[in-house]
Image: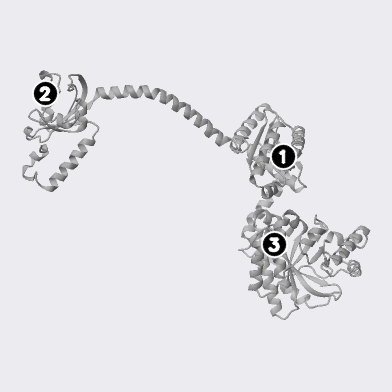
Amino acid sequence: MSHPLAALAPGLASSTALQRILREQQALLDSAGVGIAFIRNRTVLRCNQHCANIFGLASPEEVVGRSSEGLHPSRDAFRELGRAAFPDLSRGLAYRTKRQLRRSDGRLFWAHLTGRLINPHDSGEGSLWIIDDIDAQRHARALLDSAMVSRLQREIEDRRSDQERIYRMAHYDALTQLPNRVLLAERGEEAIRLAQENGTPLAVMFLDLDNFKHVNDSLGHRVGDALLVEIARRLQGTVRERDTVARLGGDEFVLLLPRANAQGAERVAAKMQEAAMQPVQVGHHELSLALSMGIALFPEHGSDFETLIQCADTAMYRAKAGGRNNYCFFTPQMQEQSARALQLTNALRRALERNQLSLHYQPQVALPTGRVHGVEALLRWNHPELGSVSPAEFIPVAEDSGLILPIGEWVLRTALAQLQAWHAAGLPRLTMAVNLSATQLRQPQLPQMVEHLLHEHRIAAHMLELELTENVAVDDPHTAIASMEQLHTMGVRLSMDDFGTGYSSLSQLKRFQIYRLKIDQSFVRDLDHDGNDRAIVSAIIRMAQALGMRTTAEGVETADQLAFLREQGCDEAQGYYFSRPLPAAELERHRLGCQAA
């Protein structure tokens, strides 16, 4: 059967292009979701599959050739449609109406009809009609509505369940099921509002597990997680129902205690300590932990929850610094110190690039000869606004902020460059002592960095002495030993700084392959008149001699101190008796190569 559109252009019907266009148009018709029919001289010339479906026929071929009048309920209805449509169609407009039509089995149905002449100037070319089955839509909607009721109920339940799950994920810690930071803030703000309205006290406690990192590092995160879950359970068991125990993350917890004053907070802190210290059995491991806690009170320490959290956090760090397994109330002085630490941290970040850091060098004198045999490099910071900042103040800030790593590398590089310059100038073959922080020692690449700098400045390894504190080795002995062994193999000498003030043992001294013990100045200061200090210094020197280690006394300021140290066989000394720490140029002029008194 020829396509009806072909009749519109009989001279082109056989062209390939036209055939392609016709195929594309038929494909579009068949994919339409409404019935489409071409009618000429009251006969259906072509229709799509949906049109056949509407009238209850299997295919378009069963519709083609039928009288369009037979698709209507009656001849009168058919003619009435023609009369109504003619004015719009003859003007080239689309005609739209709602009419009853008849299916092939005789059943009537309602449909939306839209008609348009193919050529408004020649109605004989036929018309195009779009048929949208209203009854089918209603029937489908009824079926859909029926199915949707139960589906909607399921969706509502699923959505409610999803919302509850999302809420829980957003407000509770996944590991311990405790409230998280978000829910804690909501409850904290509400608790403060009620405290303000009722004039009642409120306490916030910030808790941190002491040495929890060692559990994770040595036993793994699975054991660490199980320990956190048990600690959370115990904390919840020690508070009232109206109190909130929240986990902020890691090993940090916060307690919100409505209506608790200082005495009430102290009682809770004591309960917490007792609960946390009870042994925890995790698999084959029996573990005990202690808590460091900081306490802030409303309204004394802050009028909003965020401020109280910060104050409690600050107090917790003070408790940790005071020996751990302790609690501490916030004081305004802590806030001033925190603000100062923040100020120093921000300023220290730019100190290197702005050339605000420098090194001073303090001579180390060999006591048998009285000659300077080495120097210790000491870091100094002179800020244009803050002035000269004490190392005792800014070094801890650098360690806490991680700035100690770039600063420490700069110190080592600068010290070795200065040592190279002195050697090149023909000055005595000095050794250079440089302090090493715990953070630096924990860096696996430390030995490689030291080796690179020694090679860069053509300094023999035994001319460099790295000074460690006792607690550096105690905090992480495995990492410390690994780094020390590599440094020792390279030939770098290691000394134990401030010896006698920390917690190192004789077995650790042996394992650390220490070359020198530096006797802390707190023992040297009162050698003139304190028998205990004299006994301690003498014992340290004897022990070092027995272990094959050298000794250096720090903080020597008087001739009597020097005489006692020489008498006891101390190898070297440094202090203001010989020289204060000096810039390199000044040290060259006044001290290097000179006999000490």
Residue at image coords 64%, 31%:
191
Left or right side of 563 for 97: left
Q: Quadrant of residue 118?
A: top left
The N terminus lies in quadrant = top left
The alpha-carbon separation of the residues under discs 2 and 3 comes to: 100 Å
Q: Mark 3 Cα within 10 Å, few/some/many (few <14, many 20+)?
A: many
Mark 2 — residue?
Answer: 69
Mark 1 residue element? strand
Q: Which of pointers 1 and 3 lies earlier in the amino acid sequence?
A: 1
Residue 483: image tag: 3
Residue 281: image tag: 1
Q: State whether residue 565 is above or below residue 429.
A: above
Query: Does the rendering let one see residue 201?
Result: no
Q: Quadrant of residue 98?
A: top left
Please provide percent x and percent y for residue 29.
20, 36
Single out the residue that lies furthest toward the bottom.
426
Depth check, mark 1 against mark 3: the one in front is: 1
